[in-house]
Amino acid sequence: MSTILYVCASPRGGRSHSRAVAEAFLEGYIQAHPADQIITLDLFTLDLPSFDGLRINAKYNILHGLSHNPDEKAAWKVVEEYIHDFKAADKYVLASPMWNFGIPYRLKHYFDIIVQPGYTFSFSPETGYQGLVTGKPIFLALARGGQYLEGAPAAAFDLQRPYLELILKFIGFTDIRSIVVEPTLAAGREVAQTRRQEGMARAREMGKDF
Ligand SMILES: Cc1cc2nc3c(=O)[nH]c(=O)nc-3n(C[C@H](O)[C@H](O)[C@H](O)COP(=O)(O)O)c2cc1C
């Protein structure tokens, strides 16, 4: 039995296009793998721990080989639990809107918690950076109000997909599959609904083979 971690970064519930596509993907997946388990991490309902001075001290103490005081120890334990839960999954699904050309702040917050040296990536002067989350696939359901087609001038504004691919590759993912729903605003509701339905139909098929 495999476990899928579904990370959802849109707060728009049923109106969200990225969620609709991610959830169609999961429907297809569960049809094909009825015994598997889906764990949902809804980043806008979750009270993510602040990555503040205390936690940064804890992080840097590890980097510098120093021990933690009791407050740092407790603060770092929470980070370790998030990382543990992330790494415990066998497969991943991520739904993300584009916000201000990048990703929603809650998703960046989540990455700031789980992307840690010694846990999700390693570094040595001999081998450089190496991702530690390896051998697991991830499906990205991405939505954006505008359209950022490859090769078009607008593509330079897309810091959502390239950033997600970069950070995920950095921590070890090599099997990154995706569906982009666009434009969800710029061409009106009808186009948005059509793209959403097309995305959901493709996602349902892709989910069966994940
Ligand atoms: C705070 C905020 C910022 C946004 N910034 C952009 C943007 O920079 N570019 C864009 O094309 N759409 C932008 N949008 C529109 C969303 O990408 C669009 O509504 C998308 O469908 C959201 O994904 P969702 O439907 O899964 O919530 C923004 C929306 C919000 C709420």
Image (cartoon, grey):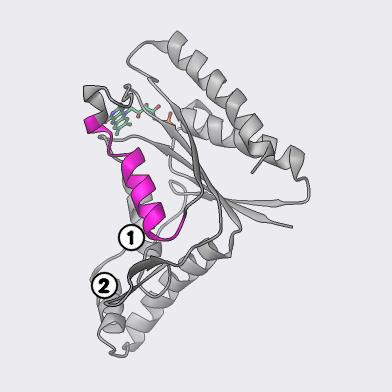
Displayed quadrant of residue 70: bottom left
Element on which disc 2 rests: helix
Q: Position of residue 91 (x, y in %)?
A: 59, 53
Q: Is residue 187 visible?
A: yes
Numbered label attached to residue 180: none
Residue annotated with mark 2: 56
Disc 2 under 8 Å from ligand 1? The reply is: no
Residue annotated with mark 1: 112
- How far apart marks 1 and 2 lie (CA) works out to 10 Å
Q: Position of residue 81 (x, y in %)?
A: 49, 70
The amino acid type found where label 1 is placed reads: Asp
Q: Position of residue 140 (x, y in %)?
A: 48, 40
Q: How many marks?
A: 2
Element on which disc 1 rests: helix
Residue 22: in magenta span:
no
Displayed quadrant of residue 31: top right
Of residues 204 and 174, the one nearer the viewer is 174
Left or right: where 51 falls relative to 190: left
Image point (34%, 55%), residue name: 109
